[in-house]
Amino acid sequence: MIELNELTDAAQKAFPADKLSPARDASWELCAEMGWLMIRVPEDDGGLGLGRDASTAIHYEMGRVLSTAPLIPAQLGLQTVIACEAFEGRAEWLERLSAGEYAPLHMLPARVQADAGGTLSGTISGIFDADMAVAVVANLPSGYHLIPIDAAGVEVVERQIWDPSRRLFDVVLDGYAPDPALVLAAGEAAHALHGLLSQEAHFAIAADCLGGASAMLDLTVEYMKMRKQFDRPIAMFQALKHRAADLKTRIVAAEALLWNRVHDADATTTQLGGLKTLAAEVYEFVTEEAIQLHGGIGLTEEHNCHLFMKRAMLNLQLCGSSDLWNERTGREALAALA
C-alpha cells in the first residue's frame, strides 16, 4: 500500500516549489508516468485502488506549484467512467485514460439543442485544456456522454482567461450525431452520478486552493526575512509577524476541515461545497495579504504574487460561487438546529 507521505514526497521531487507553472505537456507526461491518473482506478480494473485522501494529497501538491497539467478534470473524467459500470466501453476507456489520454469532465448542463434529425448543435462552455483531449465527458440533456473531439460536427475554440496557469475552451457542436455506445449514464443514474462527481470536484478544488495558499505564505515569509527596512528584516516587525501568523492560522484551520471531510463518508454535498468555499476564500485572502506584505514589488507582473492571485480568483467561481454555497451551508446548518 502506498503511503500518503510517499505520494507527497514524489510530487515535491517531480514538481519542486521553486519552479511554478511548469510546461503543460511535459507536466502531463510526467503525471501519467508517475501513475497519478491511476490513483483512483480500482485494482480490479488495473489501477492503484487508492482512496480520496490520495488524490487530495496530489491535488494539494499540484496547487503549490500552480500546475498547468489538467489533472483535476482528468481524474474527474476517469471517475465518471469508473462509476458507470453498465457502460459497455468502460474497460477500454479506463485503459486509455489511465495510460495518459485525456477526457476532461464538464459538469455544467450543455447549452445544446436537438436538430430535426436527432443531431445536436450548441456550445459546451468552459472545458479545461480541451485542445489536448481525445474526448469530453459532457452533461447533455439526455445524460452524461463521451464526445470524441475528432467527431464530425465538433469544434474546439479557445477562450482567453486571466489565469495563465490554465487554458479554457468551448466545444462547439454543429450537427453532431451522438453515439449511443458512448452514453455513460442517463435519467436517474445521471442525476446520482452528478452528485458523486460534485463531491469529488469540491475536494479537488479545495486541495488546490490550500496548496496554493500554503505556497504563497511560504514565499511571503521568505521575502519578509530578506526585505529590510531601517536596517532590519521586516519579518522582525511585530505587526507584520501577527499578519503572517493570522494567515497561517486560517490555512491550518481550513486544512483541518479538508482532511476531516476526506475521511467523512457521510459528508453532504452542501458541506463539501462549504469546504470548497472556505478554502477558496482563504486562498483569496492569503494572496491579497501577500501582495500587501510584498509591498510595491507585489503589485507588479515581474513577481509571482499575481499568478497565485489569479488562480485564487478563478477557483472562487469553480463548482459554484461563494454566495451560493454560503447560503446553502447556512440553511442546512439552521435546519439541523431546528
Image (cartoon, helix red, strand yellow):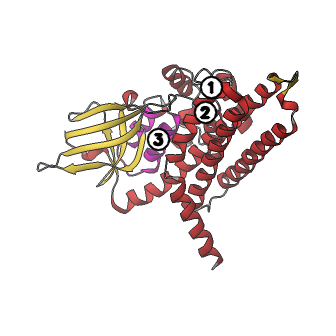
Residue 323 appears left or right of 108:
right
Number of labels in the image equals 3
Q: Residue at x 40, y 38 (%)?
A: 127
Q: Which callout, 1 or 3, points at the residue further toward the start of the chain?
A: 3
86, 11: nearer the viewer: 11
Q: Which numbered dot is residue 304?
A: 1
**Quadrant of the drawing holding the N terminus:** top right
How packed mark 2 is, by other alpha carbons closer than 10 Å (few <14, some 14-19, many 20 or more), is many
Q: Amino acid at mark 3?
A: Leu
100, 60: nearer the viewer: 60
Disc 1 vs disc 3: which is toward the camera?
1
Q: Which numbered dot is residue 78?
A: 3
Residue 311 appears left or right of 86:
right
Q: Which numbered dot is residue 308?
A: 2
Disc 3 vs disc 2: which is toward the camera?
2
Taking the image as drawn, is residue 197 in sight?
yes
Q: Which of the 4 image quadrants contains residue 30?
A: top right
Write down the region rendered in magenta.
Answer: 71-97
Q: In the rendering, at what x and y percent does residue 321 appear?
A: 50, 52
Q: Which of the 4 image quadrants contains residue 43?
A: top right
